[in-house]
Amino acid sequence: MNKPNEIIIRFTIYGFLIGIFFPVVSLFIHSLTGDVSFSLQGFSQLHALFPGQIILDLIPFFSTIAGTILGYSESTHISNLLKKSEEENKRSEKILVFTEKLINNQLDAALDLKEKDDPLGKSLINLRDNLKQNIDQQQERKMEDDQRNWVSEGLAKFGDILRSSFENMEDYAYNIISYLVRYLDANQGGFFLVEQEPGGERFFELKASYAYDRRKFADKKIEWGEGIIGTCALEKQTVYMTDLPEGYLEITSGLGQSTPDHLLIVPLIVQEEVLGIIELASFQTILDFEIDFVESIAESTANTLSSLRSNIRTSALLRESQNQAETLAVQEDKMRHSMEQLKNTQEQAARQAEKFISFTNSVNHTLIRAEYDTEGTLIYANTKFLHMLGYFSNAEVEGQPISIFLDEKDREWFDPIWKRISEGGQHYEGYMKHITKTGQDLWTMATYTCVRKDDGTVDKILFLAIDTTEQRKQSLDYEGQIDSINRLNIKIEFAPDGKYINCNELFLDTMKFSRNELEKMSVFDLIEKAELESFNETWEGVTRGVPHQGQYKSLTKYDDEKWFRVTFTSVNDMYGEVAKVICLATDITNEKVMELESRKNTEQLKVQEDKLKLAGVELKKKLEQSKESLEQQYQMITRERDRMQQALLNDPNIILTIDQSSRILFINLRAESFFGVKLTNTAGKNIKSLFPGDVAEMDSFILSLFDPRTRKITGEKKRVKILDKSGKVHTAEIYLTLSEQKNEVSYTAFISLS
């Protein structure tokens, strides 16, 4: 006999013994009083004397039935427990397999969840999805960071090139094109400038070229509108070509004998005027962000080129003016010391006057020119001055003070300069902002110098300038970009030997050192000692021109740990030698702390997984040992359960089962007949649907069955009144039992009608 059957029989015997106790006790009591003898005959006489004894005789019958029902309930509980155990074992095996795949980075692994509310399974699936998402996001962020760092480093290096001084245009062009070819890892590059022949025809002249890591010298001219370069100049648009046929570049470009597959041509444009062309060729694809970078470089180069050409022209004119002034001074000296040479001097003066007039006309066509007296009152302005400041005639400006052309803020620093010049002091040369008639800003490269009388006193102040408004705006924008980089990134500059040169405020705020303290330090003082050996090799590579990016830990002045994502880039001087090393860094201390914590948690999780594997193996071993026995018991329990279900279904009493939410799980045939319903229609509904009528008039025991939050009385018989399907009132006894199966609670009511 299996264990479930033993439970049912044991509960049945207990029920019978409890029930037989009452008639035996009654016979025993009456035998003590002398009414009857304690025997079967006395038991028979007891019924004759007391007819109500028949009620006590029925108790064993009902208690036996109740015991049988309770035994069945307990048997069902064991059956469900075995079923749950088997399902849990299968679920654990699936979770273990899925977890092992996640540990092995098999992030495409799937987990079949039979139960939609399985929290562990959902957590593992969410973990897999989060791991995949984190990996994708990390790769995307790294690529974006690399591109931004690449552009920032390139702009910083190019800024140094633009700020450098060059003796001629060829060196200027070579430094730009060689920098672009090396930084883009291209193969060839050419820098073309627009020149003009005496007859007025424009053409492109190759000022500098760079190919295969060395300078190339080529005397090449391209007519305006000829080939790809000419087309690019006409359309004023960047040209990017791929899959070029063999020998194509050799025919249509100025780069020599090689034929790379990718060609990028970018025009140098200022105010819709093409000043030159940058041509780059590469065997590798030139990416979109690299093209944008080259276009930014081209824009800055064009503005600088325009300013440089203007400066060259202005310097030449100024030198010529100074030479003329020196010549006049010599002639005047000769006139004072030798009256005999008066005629010759006058003739020479006439010739010089003609030259000076010619020079003045040239100046008036090229430069903004005005003259002021020593009090700052304008006495003359040329046409270019009037045009650039928005006036129509000299009558509008003559007699006006210089203050109307200056901003109030600029007068604070310019007034002392004017006072110095008007008293015969040193001249002024530099950038200066003027205010037009309409209130617009006009930026110029200006020169204020005094013109003296014969006695050496100041006669008037000469103002000469060229319009640099667009160049100045571009310069301010570029300076703003550099300033933005300094605000967003930690920046430090080191000498090739590692000694500190300079840093921005963000570095000082982060590391808490003062500039005086940093002047005594080097880059090696900021690196953790354990990393110094490997860092020395890295530094040697950086000083050879190899950029480096990595993560380093450093200690602040107060020994607080800081983690940085660092980029080391060398900056070359005009001779191609490393002048300094720029370090751009981002504080990633919080990220690193989270990363280290994540690693620690991962290691702990791995240990727990190992323990879980061992426990799973042990559990599997035990389950296999008991599997055969459980299967046999399960089969016997299943057969017994079917018999018990059939018995309950056909039981003459009303039997119904609800869950902890008061929803109907089971009703037998007697209940279907009494309430006039079917199990298929009522399953899942609140038990209240079986008890129509006014809730206020119902017994509290019945009401407790309706509300999941109300405590229910189990293990006791309660007498209540209920209605059948026709509305007839019946008096019934209800016995409620509780069944708990792993956090699932159900109640079974046994209802017998009087």
Image: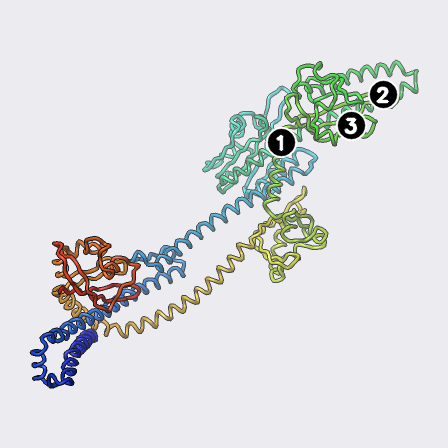
Please state, as top left, top right, bottom left or bottom right, where the N terminus lies in the image: bottom left
Name the residue that disc number 3 marks: 418
Among numbered discs 2 and 1, the one appearing first in the sequence: 2
Seen from the viewer's position, the closer of residues 744 and 228 is 744
Give the image location of residue 462, x and y in percent: 77, 23
From the image, state whether disc 1 or disc 3 is nearer to you.
3
Please state, as top left, top right, bottom left or bottom right, where the C terminus lies in the image: bottom left
Seen from the viewer's position, the closer of residues 394 and 37 is 37
In this picture, residue 630 sits left or right of residue 44: right
Dot 3 amino acid type: Trp
In this picture, residue 38 sits left or right of residue 390: left
Marks 3 and 2, how far apart at CA:
18 Å
- Image quadrant where residue 411 sits: top right
Dot 2 amino acid type: Lys
Q: Which mark is residue 453?
A: 2
Q: Of helix, strand and loop, which one carries label 2? A: loop
In this picture, residue 523 sits left or right of residue 638: right
